[in-house]
Image (tube, rainbow, N blue to C red):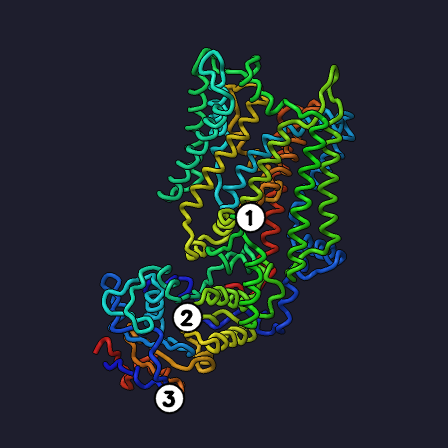
Amino acid sequence: MSTEFTQTSPSAAEPLLKVREIDKHFGPVQALYHVDLDLYAGKVTALCGDNGAGKTVLTKTLAGIHQPDHGQIFWQGQPVHVRSPRDASRLGIETVYQDLALCDNLDIVQNMFLGRERLRQGLLDEDSMERSAAETLASLRVTTVRSIRQPVASLSGGQRQSVAVAKAVMWNSKLVMLDEPTAALGVVQTRMVLDLVKRLRDHGLAVMVISHNLNDVFDVADRIAVLYLGRMVVQEDLSRLDRQRVVEYMTTGGRHDGQSPARS
Amino acid sequence: MARAPRAADVEGVPPEQAPDLTAAPGADKVEVPPAIVAQSLGGYMRAWVARIRAGESGVLPVLVGILAISIYFDARSTVFLSPGNLVNLFQQSAIFMVLAMAETFALVLGEIDLSIGYVGACGAAITVQLVQPVTTGWPWWAAIVAGLVFCLVFGAIQGTLITRLRLPSFIVTLAGFLIGNGMMLWILQRGPFSGYPNLTGVNGNEQVIYQLMWGTLDPTVSWILMAVAVAALGVYIWLGDWRRRRSGLVAPPASLTLIKIAVIAAVGIVVVAICDQNRAALGTLEGVPWVMVIVLGVLAAWTVLFQRTRYGRYIYAIGGNPEATRRAGINLALVRTGVFALCSFTAGIGMLLFASYLGGMSNNVQGGQYVLYAVAAAVIGGTSLFGGRGKPLHGVLGGLVIGGIYNGMFLLNYDVEPQFIVTGLVLLAAVTIDSLSRRGSTSGSVGRV
């Protein structure tokens, strides 16, 4: 099974993040087999696949939550080990999980700075944090939020997603991974989040979006990577694929006879 | 697949948040608490009313409660609102206030500490024993430090068991309650006092501890101290709001800032005016009692800790969403252990005031009852039982309610039975308000994942 689709990218630039031959198993379950993945700055890569294909395991491996059994991760061309979420943040990798990890009882500023509060004379420097949070939100044009001092509990789903994304990009991050950002969102809210994803790309960040929703994928992504039963079956510019092909990759691993490559 | 079951549930399911499908982009605006967009005084008042309607009542219910208690008991007892009784009421309430502030630590974290009554009593027993001139005769400050350090260590051990071994706080502190009770009795049996070491001797060290509750400041000193405190707080509030207005951040209008400062000053003046009246039947007893300064000091210190430090922020964050806090790289075990240590430490201060109130320590201290009063006071004041919400100020106001009921029913010669029942009913009312306001705030927003 060939996984060498990486050279087809028109971007001659070195990928920001390069994953080579990653294996990961949990007990007897092999979650990832020799997975390769390239993520480019200034591009949105959609990571697709059916339930259990390994999308979340791959994401968590890049985020430092899981350690790969074999294989290597290259960051800006250098081999790196991402042993913890702290390591990932230090490199500039931020992940927005589906549950968003926001504290409902804290306001937007407090959430965005959680764990990295600024101090002045030993006490919290609220004014400075509030200004920075406002600047970040403004640069992402998250403007439907009326005040950044409102508790997160009072926000809508799309607004919460936006705050979680803003929190992730605030720290000079270079790669943002979004896990199902539009699941459970309505039409308007989905629009808002997809626009936000495009703005991240326009800011020059590498973005990886895990999604099931092909409408969203074709709307927002530049490239697509499809996992099928733990194998990367295709990595391609989205312009070279149509929906039919993507669905085939997701459901059969790209084989027209319906045989899974894992079982062959 | 190592994936959160919740995430798997959502996968492949079409979005079902119907309200969002039809919502106009501007529809979110109605959910915004109006206070944060209001810029005028009128806007703020309207915002305040709207917040109360939405269930975000803050300290309003407890202020109404205090007013109702005052009116009820004033109508039935001529002495209830007399200066002497008001000061007495504060002295009785002070113990509940400090214990409630202690319990606030655990409650904001979403936990509970049942041990504070007896752990604090152990600390107080240690202090009272150590200052006894016929046995150890320690200086008062060393004895107080020893008692409070005991509480701090006891709380830290409980916190370690809760966080490292992941035992439920309810059970660990229930064990701490029993162990504390036993240790208190053991400590009180030391020395020749048959379980009742007292503070009524003429020894200076004993006297200092006794005066914590019963001593008063000179009336002139009281005025000066109050003026300094109000001025400092006023300048702090004014400068804070002024800086925010100047840098274009959301800030209350200047008129509201001035009203806030004026209210604080008025309360200070009224309190000192009451305290400075001679409230003794014979001779002279006037001035602000020390205990008021102590309670306000604890309130100020813990308010700064909760509102202005990283540590306090993390307590709220853990109470709101422990998983999010963990992912933010915060050491949960450290914060939570510290919370239980500070909870017991504060309880040590509270029970030291109790020992001072009693004029000694007794082996029939009802530590269990005090815990329940502490939880009740915190919740009556507006601290949530569900974690993430609450302030030290809530404990002080709730303590005043409990102290008021206790004091008023005593004046009316009620027995202890109706007093328990009424306190229980007030607690039920407070929990109901807490629960309803919580439900109100969650049902208010849509599209929550």
Specify whether residue B319 is in view. Answer: no
Q: Nearer the viewer, residue B142 or A185?
A: B142
Residue situated in front as seen by the camera: B195 or A203:
A203
Q: Is residue B152 visible?
A: yes
Q: Residue at x 54, y 44 (%)?
A: B305
Query: Measured from the top left, where is residue B390 in percent x and y?
Result: 57, 45
- Given residues A3 and B67, the one toward you in this image is A3
Query: Is tag 2's residue or tag 3's residue first in the polypeptide sequence?
Result: 2
Residue most extreme to the front: A121
Q: Amino acid at mark 3?
A: Arg
Q: Mark 1 Cα within 10 Å, few/some/many (few <14, many 20+)?
A: some
Return the chain for callout 3.
A
> x%, y% of residue B103?
53, 38
Q: Which residue is mark 1?
A: B308
In the rendered structure, find residue A174 and report the number of the disc placed on it: 2
List the residue tagged with mark 3: A240
Tell me the distance, in whole angstroms, between the alpha carbons under discs 2 and 3. Answer: 26 Å
Answer left or right for B214 relative to A164.
right
Relative to B379, residue B48 above or below: below
Which element carries disc 1, helix, strand or loop? Answer: helix
Q: Secondary structure at mark 2?
A: loop
Residues at badges 1 and 3 in contact (C-beta under 8 Å)?
A: no
Check disc 2 and give the amino acid type.
Answer: Lys
Same chain for mark 2 and mark 3? The answer is yes
For label 3, the SS is helix
Residue drawn where x is 42% and y is 72% of the image: B12
Dot 1 amino acid type: Arg
Residue A83 screen position, x and y as percent: 31, 60
Q: Quadrant of the N terminus of chain B?
A: bottom left
Identify the image quadrant of residue B399.
Answer: top right
Query: Is residue A110 depicted above or below B359 in this figure?
Result: below
- Vertically, is B44 above or below B126? below
